[in-house]
Image: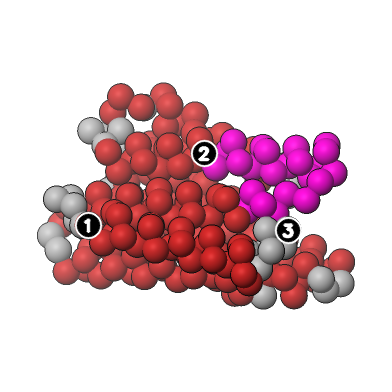
Amino acid sequence: MSVLVPCSILLPIVIGLLKLQRLPASARIIWYYLIVSAVVSAAFSFMGRKLHINNMPLVHLYTPIEIVFFCWFYTKILWPRGNRFLNIWLPVLFTIFCIANALFVQSIYIYSSYTRSVEALICIILALNYFARMATEGNEKKNISNPELYFNSGIFFYFSGGFMLFVFSNFIINSSHNNYAVIFVIYAALVLCMYILFAVAFLLCKK
């Protein structure tokens, strides 16, 4: 789980790279997100395994970056003409929330469970918004070969499954080794499924 799942991010990255010229704007955003995620994941592992230093500050830094990508993505697929709140104000307000949380509530040296949980709620709401629109709009949105459906499904599956893990993460980390191992396997499975759905979406992309 600690090797296969992090490396599985290369599957959608490689497929996206091979089809980069044919990717629509929304798919390119997800591809850029995966590149950043891969770099952060590599740095996270290097800090923890090789340098043996606390890598939690990376989680605090990565969380607002992640919400910027997802807000950008949903602006493209939900409001192609732009949505000032989703594209600008929500990322700004969330970043301020992350900074306040790191300064006054949860130290950068512990897992940022509050900000991760709020991020999960935001992404779940946006994903459900897409599903609702898909249910009410024309056949193009409902088409099973529509890559946006798989991108959205991956995001929804990951964050809806991981929400409770984020909420109770610090409790889980401080619990018994067996409990932590089980939760880690569940989280790894959620990440793997998201990457597989992203890979399918990239395969279906036609500009």
Q: Is residue 135 left or right of residue 168?
A: left
- Binning the other alpha carbons within 10 Å of mark 2 as few (below 14), some (14 to 19) or many (20 upward) gives some
User: In this view of the protein, which residue sits in the foreground, 66 or 10?
Assistant: 66
Mark 1: give few (<14), some (14-19) or many (20+) Cα within 10 Å.
few
| Place of residue 41 in the rendered image (x, y in percent of width and height, measured from the top left) | 64, 42
Say which quadrant the C terminus sits in: top left
Residue 173, given in percent of the width and then of the height, sits at 77, 67
**Mark 1 = which residue?**
84
- Position above or below: 59 against 120: above
Is residue 42 a member of the stretch shown in magenta?
A: yes
In reply to whether residue 157 is colored magenta, the answer given is no
Numbered label attached to residue 109: 3
* Residue range of the region highlighted in magenta in the rendering: 37-59
Name the image quarter holding residue 110. Answer: bottom right
User: What element does badge 3 sit on?
Assistant: loop
The image's mark for residue 36 is 2
Instruction: Name which of mark 3 and mark 2 comes first in the sequence.
Output: 2
Instruction: Please identify, in this view, whether the residue under mark 1 or under mark 2 is nearer the observer.
Output: 1
Q: Position of residue 152 (x, y in %)?
A: 37, 56
Please name the amino acid that badge 3 sits on. Answer: Tyr
Q: CA distance from mark 1 to mark 2?
A: 24 Å
Residue in the picture at 79% in, 63% down: 181
C-alpha distance separating marks 1 and 3: 33 Å
